[in-house]
Amino acid sequence: MKFTINKRDIVDVMGKVQGLTGRRSSLAITECVRIQGSEDRVQITATDLETCYEGTFPAQVENSGTIAIAARKFYEIVREFPAADIMIQEAENRWINIGDKKVHYHLMGMNPDDFPNTPFFEAGEMFDIPSADLKKMIEKSIVISGIGEDKKAHINGVLFERLTEETPKRLRMVSTDGSRLSKYDYRFADDQALPAGEAVIVPKKGLHEVSKFLGAGGNVQVAIEGSYFIVKAPAETLAIRLLEGQFPKYGDIIFRSEGYAIEMDKDKFHNMLKRMSILCTDSYRAAFFTFDADQLVINATNPDIGESKEDMPIAYTGPKMEAGFNPRFFIEALNCVEDEKLIVNILNDEKPCLLEGVTDKSYLGVIMPMRV
């Protein structure tokens, strides 16, 4: 196998697949990328056995063939390569030459036949969505990460729903870690196609890798086929193996008619939370929120450090309530709200607090009070 490829066509993608090839798996060859060359292009494949990436790029292919090369070192080489064009040639015993007239590398490859089989997909029911909007959905969902060694599907995954019976049709992602929840809806126009299908759970770490490849322009195609969540761009495809399990019924939490809806300035509340979280640590995570007579008071106490307290005026006329919350959860939820004005819905010291924008209802954050 021998081909020449332009540096700009390969260096970016090699940087993005490091999250797949750098992840521990039961097969050493998953630390490699497989490169298949034929005619005027090469196909690059990377996988961690749960998420698979395939991309096709233009190249000058002199001899077709397939190689498997260590992804990390290959990326470092192409990233620092001084010339625009890079020649890659397979030598005897799976050694691989990389270079040009001035620079030369001689690296040991692996047997490409040992590379895991990648899933094959039919041209199923795919739908279009702007790349930037899908990226936004994913980023607002995976801000709630999994918890350590917890193996529950609903903790490590994001619920992906197609609400085709509603008007307008919606694509929804819901994420939780048991202490908080996020919901994000993307609304489809009347003339946009959204095929019906069952709700599935997509791994958060796979969605994190997908988000790296989603740009600010253009559309991508999305589908659920078999046990895979598929995102397809013109020259690239990513497939994530779905998780098996049940996602908790969240409707009773996010849809409630009761509670006290308090409008706040998002930035003022956000800055207040950041100041009050300074004394919070892994051992003392809670800050106490007191709602009383048009005033919110937040205080944090850490016996190892000290105390902090701050108040701000709010439009609240309900009974006095005090509840403990993790301020970091509020801060991360506020980062997902795009409105300048915020609605905080509080019911009592035992029920979750809801956060959303005043006008943009795409995102809803839910935070459970802490038992302290």
Image: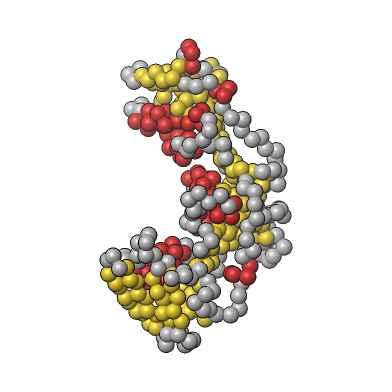
Residue nearest the viewer, comparing 17 with 168: 17
Q: Mark yes or no: residue 357 visible.
A: no
Residue nearest the viewer, comparing 136 with 280: 280
Q: Position of residue 104 (x, y in %)?
A: 36, 19
Vertical arrangement, residue 344 with respect to residue 54, above or below: below
Please count the marks in the image: 0
Vertical arrangement, residue 367 with respect to residue 310, above or below: above
Residue nearest the viewer, comparing 100 with 343: 343
> Could you tell me which residue is drawn at 47 percent across and 38 percent down?
23
Q: Position of residue 318 (x, y in %)?
A: 49, 86
Vertical arrangement, residue 149 with respect to residue 165, above or below: above
Colour style of the rendered protein structure: secondary structure
User: Which residue is most to the top?
Assistant: 92
Q: Position of residue 30 (x, y in %)?
A: 51, 31
User: Which residue is most to the left?
Assistant: 305
Q: For residue 278, what is the image quadrant?
A: bottom left
Q: Mark yes or no: residue 50 visible.
A: yes
Asked whether, in this view, residue 101 is left or right of residue 159, the answer is left
> Could you tell me which residue is drawn at 69 percent across and 43 percent down?
226
Q: Please state, as top left, top right, bottom left or bottom right, where the C terminus lies in the image.
A: bottom left
Q: Position of residue 287 (x, y in %)?
A: 39, 71
> Could you tell me which residue is drawn at 66 percent across and 64 percent down?
168
Q: For residue 283, what is the image quadrant?
A: bottom left
> Could you tell me which residue is drawn at 55 percent across and 68 percent down?
361
